[in-house]
Structures are given as C-alpha cells and as structure tokens.
Image: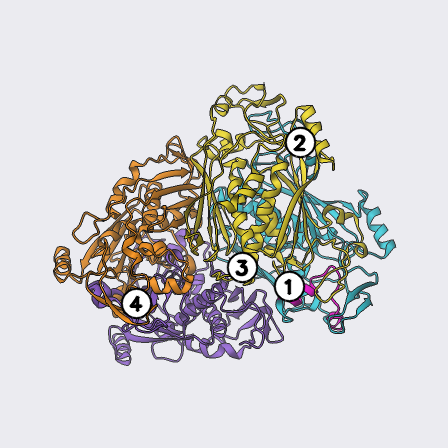
Chain colours: A yellow, B cyan, C purple, D orange
C-alpha cells in the first residue's frame, strides 16, 4: 500500500519512466495559500545536477495541481500534484533487463510482480518517486510554520569533511554512502503516543520508505547502548520541560518533550556504481560482468536531506492535527 | 492509536498497575491449535527475575483466553488474551509523583493527558504492556512455522562479553544499555513493498514501539554509510537469489530477497537507575535529589530479545498473509 | 476486521457462550468521568426480559473496566470493558449443530471458518456482541452531551400500533420484524464529508453491523424516489441553515446541515421463530423438520433502539473529534 | 478522507470544473490486461446525453493512465487514471454563489470549508467524481470475471413503467427520483464478516458515497419489517447452500451465502430542478426566488445503475482478495 498518515494522509504513485509521478494528500485544511513557486526551493535541493556526486538528469519538476487548489488556496479536498516525466532515456535500461543490478530491486521485483513490473529506470522503485514526498513535505512545512526542520549531510564515506569523502569516491570511481542528521526545533510538548504511534515509530516508518536508508537513530541512538543510566538520563531543569542534556533526542515514551528533536539516518552508497560488477543473468543462468551506464548519483545521501525533512514534516503535520493544533480551516492563520 | 498491522492486526491495552494488560488480534486464521502452554517459554524469557540485571517482580503471566478460541483451536474471530496484574505495590510510586523521573514519560504524560494518566508503575507506558506483544508474537510464530526468528543480546554497555558489561553496571550500581541482533531465516522472496510498506518501515515501526529502543539498522546499517557501492552491493549468485555477501540484510527495495534478514537494535540503559538523580518537582518548582526505589531492571536489553522476535514475527505473519501464504482456515496445516 | 472509526475507534470481541464479550475503544479523551452506573440504563434497554417479545435470558451485564480508567476518570489510553457470560445453557445448541437454522449464520460460518467457529448460541455472530456496542455508545454519548439521540420502534409487523403488531406475533407463535426511527438533535453543521466519509456512509456502515438490520434510509428515504425535485428540495430559511422542510433528514452532500438528523432502519423478524421449520442436515444430506428451542426473542426490533442510538453516537463522537469539537483532555468540560 | 477498501483500495480526487477528476487504486494485482477501450462501455452508460432525463453535457471521458500500467498490463503498483475536464462553462455558477441551491451542498460546504471550497459546478461534490468510481469499477469487474453484476432502474417517480415516470417529470418541468435494483450472481460463499466488515456494511458505505442516494435495502429489505420469521427465513435445500426463498438477498450474518445478492437503492430527484425555487441569500439575508440554469439531469437515477455496479464490484473485488480468491499476480488467469 502506498499511503501514509492518519489525518494528513499521503498517497504516492508513478514510475520513473512512465508519464508522471505524483501524489494525493487527503486532509489538507482549507485556506492554505499555495503556489508553484512554493515548491521550487525544496525540489531544487532534491534534484541532481548540482553536486559532483549527483546525477546530471534534470527534470523540470514543475508541480501541476490537478485537484484541491482553487484561487491559489487549498480547498480542504484531496490535493493532487503531478510531475511529468520528460527527460527519459529508457533505452539505457532495456538491454540489461535479465541481469539484475546488485543493490537494486530488479530481481525481487521480477519475482514478486511476475515480470509485469515497469523495469525502466527502476520503475516505481525509483528515487524519482521521492519528488512526491518532497512536494508533500512542502505542504506539510507550510502547515507548521513555527516548527523548523533542518537536515544536512554530516559525513560521507565515513569522513566528516564531506568534500573529502566525496572526492575519495570520485577518485575511486565508486559510489559512496553518508549520514544525514535532522534537527527539529519549535515542537510543542505532547506529539506522539506510546507504542504503535510513537514519534519514533511514525518517523522511522516513513524514513525507511526513502530508498537507500539503512539505519535510523534518535538522540544518542546506538551510543546509548554503551552508556549507563545516570549518564543517559536527561534531568528536567525548567517548568517547560527543558532538560540539562538531550540524550533522548526530544522524545520520551514516544512523545515529544519540547526539547530539540534529533535523528540520524544512514544512507547506503548508490547501488549504481560506475565500477564493473557481477550478477547472475536470469535468462542464461550465467554470472556476467557488466558496468552500469546511464545517469546516476555517486552519493544519493547528498539528495536525501530535503527528503528527510519532508518525511519528518509529514509526520509532524499529522501529529499536530491529531493534537488539534492545526485548524480545519485556515482563516488568515498561515 | 494502539493498533498495528493490516490483516494480522493487534490491539493492545492495559496499565502496569491496573487490573490487567492484554491484547486482541484480529485476523488470526481459524483452526490454529493453541494452548496456554504455548506461551510459557516466550513469556518466561520476557519476565524478570532470571538475570542479575533484571527485576525481581514476578507475574504469573498466565494467558487467559477471553475470545476467539474454542476447543483449543482458534475460531477465526478476534482473539483476546488477558494477563492479570497481581503482584502490585503501587505505594512505591505515589509518593514521588510530582518529581518526574529522568528518562521516564512521567512529565510528558502529565502534560499530554492533563494529570489523568495512570501514573502507577508508568501506567500504560510500562514495559508490562510488552507482555501482550510477546504473546501476540507467540501466535504469529505459530503461523509461520517455516520461518525461524532468533534475537539475542550482542553487547552490554559496549562490551561484547556480555557478562562483563553487566558486571560493570552492577559494580557501578547503575543501569546499562545494550544491543540486540535479530536474524530471520526461511523467509520467502517477496514480502514487503517499496515505500510505506517496506519491510524496514513495518519492522522499525513496531520495534520503536518497544520502550527503550533508540536505534535500528538493517544489514550493514550505519556502517554502510562509510562504504563504497562496489563493496556494499550484494551480487546474486544463484537462481533463487542467494547473494555472495549480505550487506543488505535480506531486504532490497523494501522487499525480502530470500537471504537472511538481519537487524540490530539499540536499547538505552534502564531509566530507573538506582543512582541518585536530580529532577524538577513540578509542585514546588525546586530541583530535587532523589533515588528511585521499587523493583527495576538494570538492563532492559536482557528482556528485549523475545520482544524483538515477537515484533518481527507479527510483521512477518502480516506480510505472509498479504502474500496469501497463510490460508484463512488451517486444516491440518499447522 | 472488528474495528470501526477513525479517532474514536472501537474494537469488539467475544462469543455468546465464551467467557466474555467486550470491546476496546482507542481515542477516548482523558478526563471523562465514568462509572459502572453510567451503563445500567442503556444496557437495561438492550437486555431481554422486559417485553413479551424479548427473551427471558438475563445477564448481569455489569461492565468490568480492564484498562483506561483510573480514579473514575478516563486516562486517554485504550479503554477496555468486559462483560462476563454467566447465564449459559450451551446444551441447547449442541444437539442440532448439523442442521443450519434458517435465517442464522450457521451454514455460512461453517463454510467460511471450516468448522472451527464457536457455534454455541451463534458464537461471535450472536446479538450478545451488541452489549459492547451499547456500552461503547454510552461513552460516546457522554462525549457529546449537547447532542440528543433518540431511537424508538415505530412499527411492528407493519402495525404502527406496536402492541397490536406484537400481539399478532404472539398469537401466531411466530417472530416478527419492525422499523426503528432514530432522530438526532443538537448536531453542529459540518460533520461528515462528501463520498466515502459521508455521514450516511459511516452511519449505514455501523448500523448494518447490527444483526438483523435489512435496510436503512435517511430523511424521506425510499419515498424520495417517488418525488419531484421541487417537492423534495428543502429551502434554507434562516442564516443558521434551518430549512422549511426536512426531506434530506439533516444531511446534504454527506454533511450535517444543522437540521434534525432522521434515519429509519428495517429489522427483520428474529430468525429463531418457535414455529417448525425445514433445513438440510449437512451430515445426513436430508431435509429435516425441526423446531428451535432455547431462549429467544420474538421481536429483536424491540431491543434494537438502544443499539441504533449507540451506533449513531459512536459515529457522531468520531465526527466531532475529526472536527476538533471534542478536546483531547476534558478539564471540567463534561 | 477520500479512500475506500482494504486490499483493493481506491482514492478519488478532483472537482467538476478543475483540471481533472481521477483516482488511484492501490492493490491491483500485476498482470491484468487493460486498455482505454475497456472503459468506454461503462463510462458511456454513466454519461449524460443519451436519455431525455439526462444532461447534455458531454465529456470525452477518455481515461488517461498516469501510473501502474506498462505494456497494457497492470504492474502491481498504484494505478492512477485521470479524466480531464474539458467541456466547462463555469460562468453558469458564479453569479448565484451566495444563493445556496436547495438540495445541493452549497451552504454546508461554505460553512465547513470556510468559503475556500471550489463552488463551480458543485466542485468536489459534483457527480462528475463518480467517473472515477465507474472507472475503478471497470477494473474491479475485470478482476472478478465469474461474478456478474447487473443494476437497472426499476421505477421512476413511483412508476414501474419507467418511460411513463420520466415523461411525467418532463411534463411537469421538474426533476424526479427513482429506484435502482442491483443483482449479483456467481458469488462464492464466504465473502464478508459479521459486524463492521459485513457485506451490507461495506456495500452501503460505498453506495451512500454516491450523490443522491437516500436509502438502501438488502433482499426483502424494509418489507421484512412487516413479516413473520417463518415467512422471512430462507430454508437451505441443497448442499451448496441454495435456499428455497431468498428474502435475505444472498447475505446471512454479513456473509455471502451463495444465493443471488440483491439490493435496492433509493435515488432522490435531482436537486437541480428547472422549477423556480426559494433560498436565503447569505449576503443579503433575503429569501430569493430563482431558477437554476445550466446543464442538468432531470433524473440522476438514470445514470446511477453503472455507478452502483461499480461500487458493488469494488467491494466484491476487495472481499475476493481478502479471501485469497484473486492471486497477487495474474499469469494468464484473466
């Protein structure tokens, strides 16, 4: 199923080389001012072509409002946005279909969907789908203007000097992974629930929907496993819940505690490395050596921060609605 | 909301010091043989009192079937199991209510639920609720007999020699964190979907529902962020999809690829350390020094493996149903 | 699946002759005052034994709070209530198992659940399950104190003189159907949505969950099919939306319009008529003549009004929450 | 929320005079052959312009596949279909905005969505949205080729001679209601569940999503309320569950019993009658006399049968998937 959320509910669809990718959001309040320009900045961050580690494929990425917007305001009804796929070179993919690319979903998709999957450019599995998540994130961010969400790459290939990590990959003619950190400020106390609707559950759910994510941690995260309780516990110091330390990363019992929300995400190296690789050709049943051509990113982590922000904003907008902190009709509010 | 799953759907309820904790599962096929004895082994693993790092509180933990079982078979209707809370010493908690325990949900719960929360023994936030998750996991495991799920503690307080890590905590009179590894074998190819129903999304969602979990990673996980693509990619070597390496941890594109599923989980040190701590008394608005008394675990990670197994089994049973790999009526099948 | 609702979400479970029936509600706000006495009046209306047309089976119907209540207030966590089944005479049912009772689910249940269904007293299909719906309705009604919901029987066996219709059935030694009318006043404008969350969709969904319901209509209902538009249309006469007529029954475009909500429900005659009937014995494959013994209602419509009210209240409480008209914490509010 | 279904899940969007209406279906199995021609017949039945009682507005109604179809087969991923709105005359609606049309959602929409609703041609409330439901129904019907679903108008304005009922309305220069009957054959035993997922609950839920529906009944329906049990009960006569009579209309205990499924639906007269009407102008607060111009149907019931069939097919396809009667990949199956 391709839906996520309770009151702010996103449905995504599309394939990399089909006519379009897009999404519908159900639950957007009426009265939110919205224009195509609102999307440019975040979509630009998601696009390739800026960094040496990202792909030169350039889509116009112009959001086309198909429903839910009238007179530059949201109407309260389902909001559907399309992005047409224009810059397509499908022939890159056809010739190697029977050789599943290592790290890609080619083989599992073929098994699961019986050969009917659209395999061009990874089809529905393509990171192209994250265009919709980023655009939904733009709307979510507009709904929570007092909450700031900032994600950035904090290491590439194990190097905190990110240019260095990237240069090493370029020199090695190989793709490389990275770590994203996302910090959220301005959160009210009380978002999330214990157990299945914990903030961590909802955030990790959507963040693992982003292709190439392999791990997530909140606050001190994996390092907490090496700590003692007296070190890790955050003592409350003020009546509004501010703590001396923030090992918890802003979430206790699944619920925001008013401190900075901090999460880190591990992104694997792009599966489409330029290096020669081996795979089993499922027609010949022979191991083959091959190289992936076409347009690809060396480091998909470079494009991920804005996607992580969007995913985070989608969860937080939903939580804010569940706590009745966003009205159903926005009258001169936002 | 306290529900999880699509076709195998669990609803949990209860408080640590209320009359009971329990759960309902909707979607259990008819005809599964079930008895109270089936639950003893896993419930025993979850219970305290066995390790030096776990609490001496002992509940009988006898599952009481309230619905959905007839003649020792499931009926196909909602299956409700209760665990009565018998061994309760609520007075331990009442006297310190206005001093929120660091690392616990006391303060956020008070803010969010306006003082109406049952604060005794952490109430609904208590790890006592995981009794229901473990018991639901027993049923899930019975539905997927050809899939083996094994979780264990792989480090305590940063020590791979677990006894050593635990002894250090005992010596320091402090609680301590740990890391759990869970491995799954016998998975068919094709469980999960790209995006919001990715295996990682569903697994992380439920696993972050377990109190004290702070991080999760699949396969190589965070280490992938330091790797190059040619290192990290797993080449398929056989027609059934077995790969030379398993950095992906058995999941590609959100879908099981038939290799071993591997995930690791970071568990924070128990918030209830015996050490003296500080917190802000919300009645006096004074910082107070206090020690937590009562029955508590030094290392909650020791109790977590069986909970992680249960959470994993719940997701996998649901995925197996979504793929029509578990019939709706089990006739001499299981 | 045995769940209903979005924010006020009910899960029901149990069997007629198992240990209990009950339900969990997720989404009850914290701070609602609640006591066992609150349930007596509506549960009494649902129970048999009062009218000549209802069964003499008497359950104590004492709600047992298993979770979600603390110090006579709701906590904001899942609220589970059980009703023990005490007054059981299962032997009535065992002897005739292979002869499916006409009008009952015996045969379809046997087909669908492969013989594993609890067949005693209709098992999970029993109207005994509506105890949980009525009790959930009590809570829902408490959440919407300014909305009055009143359902009553308006005809029995086609007779508007209800005593007459019932007496005819008694004289004929046969069961009989009836029509329930439910009227709701005090509804705010704006509950419901067009299409899948229309008020009619949600109300009909839950009302057809009540055993024996065969039809539902809103406002003028089926009679509207014989009318012209100029007759049927309700003209708005006042600024708050009151209409000259109320053929729409208070709902336009799926949304409450502030006028009285009116719905009618057709209830079939109780399937367990005392009259001799025929059915195919699935063991012998012979048509058999038999009579149903045991405790049964001549006219289940007599017990239905309080169930219809409860179902209506459950939908309306959910809609009120969706419109943010019920706070998440009730501080001296209700 | 604009979603419906569990495994076969439809999301609708669009407005009458926006760029398009459309829908996404999640859960379509891979491998279903699909072409634009498949949709023509049912879309033609839904369109106006054929009968004297229907509107002359003509949309091309050409389905545009935006995702989920590749090489004329479904891929197993979300299937999105758009219908562009081309034949739009919005000026018809603008001039009368402040005068809510009786029987239409103008006033409630204005209240609920704060004036941000797209009011042109009823916006999201328009029956234009049912284009998506009909098209989704085409796909659903293709998934259940052995089940035949046939709906037809059985009376207009109370007249079983339908031409007569319609002529009376034409003569009266007024709109008129009607009754639709839908019969389903070839259903397997066992679709549906007791309570909230009863076949009646699911069918009524989606059917009340169709604009202008005011009532629904199954089998004998409202007439059952006047019957005795010995009359109404259907005796099973054959081992495959065929009954002597079919008062139940093919559903017992919420579950299909293998007999013909029969339901009837009351459709109100079109709210847009050509006759002069009164309404309160919300700007002037004066009652005004006005006539509705523009293109409208005298009898929307004439367009409803194919929508009712589609709604029915959507529910049945979902139920068939829940019973594992439709495979996840269709290999030469359909």
| Subunit bearing disc 3 | A
Q: Which residue is mark 4?
A: C248
Disc 4 to disc 2: CB gap under 8 Å: no
**Disc 4 vs disc 1: Cβ atoms closer than 8 Å?**
no
Would you name the residue on which mark 2 appears?
A: A176
Which quadrant of the rendered structure holds the C terminus of chain D?
Answer: top left
In the displayed structure, would residue B231 be above or below residue D113? above
Q: Is residue C325 left or right of residue D291?
A: right
In this rendering, the count of numbered labels is 4
Q: Tell me the crowding category of disc 3: few under 14, some 14 to 19, or many 20 or more residues within 10 angstroms, Cα based.
A: many
Whole-Å distance between the Cαs marked 4 and 2? 63 Å
Badge 1 is on which residue? B124
Disc 4 versus disc 3: distance between alpha carbons?
A: 31 Å
Front-lying residue, D18 or A252: D18
SS at mark 1? helix
Classify residue B292 as left or right of residue B213: right
Query: Is D55 left or right of B91, judged from the image as shown?
Result: left
Q: Secondary structure at mark 3?
A: helix
Residue named by callout 3? A321
Which circle, 3 or 1, is nearer the viewer?
3
What kind of element bears circle 2? loop
Q: CA distance from mark 4 to mark 1?
A: 44 Å
Q: Specify the segment rendered in magenta.
A: B91-112
Query: In the displayed structure, would residue B266 be above or below residue B256?
Result: below
Q: CA distance from mark 1 to mark 2?
A: 43 Å
- Asked whether A107 or C122 is in front, the reply is A107
The answer to the question of whether label 4 and label 3 lie on touching residues, with beta carbons closer than 8 A, is no
**CA gap, disc 2 to disc 3?**
38 Å
State which chain disc 1 sits on.
Answer: B
Labels 3, 1: one chain: no
């Amino acid at each position: 199923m391709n839906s996520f959320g309770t009151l702010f509910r996103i449905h995504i669809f599309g394939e990399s080389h089909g006519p379009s990718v897009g999404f519908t959001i159900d639950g957007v309040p009426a009265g939110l001012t919205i224009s195509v320009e609102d999307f440019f900045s975040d979509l630009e961050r998601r696009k390739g072509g800026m960094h040496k580690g990202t792909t030169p494929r350039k889509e116009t990425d112009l959001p086309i409002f198909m429903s839910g917007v009238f007179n530059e305001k949201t109407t309260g009804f389902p909001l559907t946005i399309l992005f047409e796929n224009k810059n397509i070179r499908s022939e890159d993919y056809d010739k190697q279909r029977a050789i599943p690319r290592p790290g890609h979903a080619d083989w599992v998709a073929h098994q699961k969907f019986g050969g009917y999957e659209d395999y061009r450019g990874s089809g529905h599995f393509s990171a192209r789908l994250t265009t919709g998540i980023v655009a939904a994130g733009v709307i979510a961010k507009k709904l929570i203007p007092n909450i700031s969400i900032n994600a950035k790459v904090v290491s590439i290939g194990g190097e905190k000097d990110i240019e260095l990590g990237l240069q090493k990959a370029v020199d090695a003619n190989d793709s490389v992974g990275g770590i994203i950190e996302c910090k959220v400020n301005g959160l009210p106390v009380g978002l999330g629930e214990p157990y299945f609707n914990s903030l961590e559950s909802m955030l990790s759910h959507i963040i693992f929907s982003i292709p190439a994510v392999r791990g997530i941690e909140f606050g001190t995260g994996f390092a907490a496993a090496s700590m003692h309780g007296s070190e890790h516990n955050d003592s409350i110091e003020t009546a509004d819940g501010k703590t001396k330390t923030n090992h918890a990363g802003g979430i206790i019992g699944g619920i925001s505690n008013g401190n900075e929300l901090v999460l880190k995400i591990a992104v694997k190296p792009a599966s489409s490395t330029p290096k020669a690789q081996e795979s089993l050709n499922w027609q010949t049943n022979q191991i083959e050596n091959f190289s992936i051509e076409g347009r690809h990113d060396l480091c998909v982590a470079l494009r991920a921060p804005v996607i992580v922000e969007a995913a985070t904003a989608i969860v937080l907008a939903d939580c804010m609605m569940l706590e009745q902190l966003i009205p159903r009709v926005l009258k001169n509010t936002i």
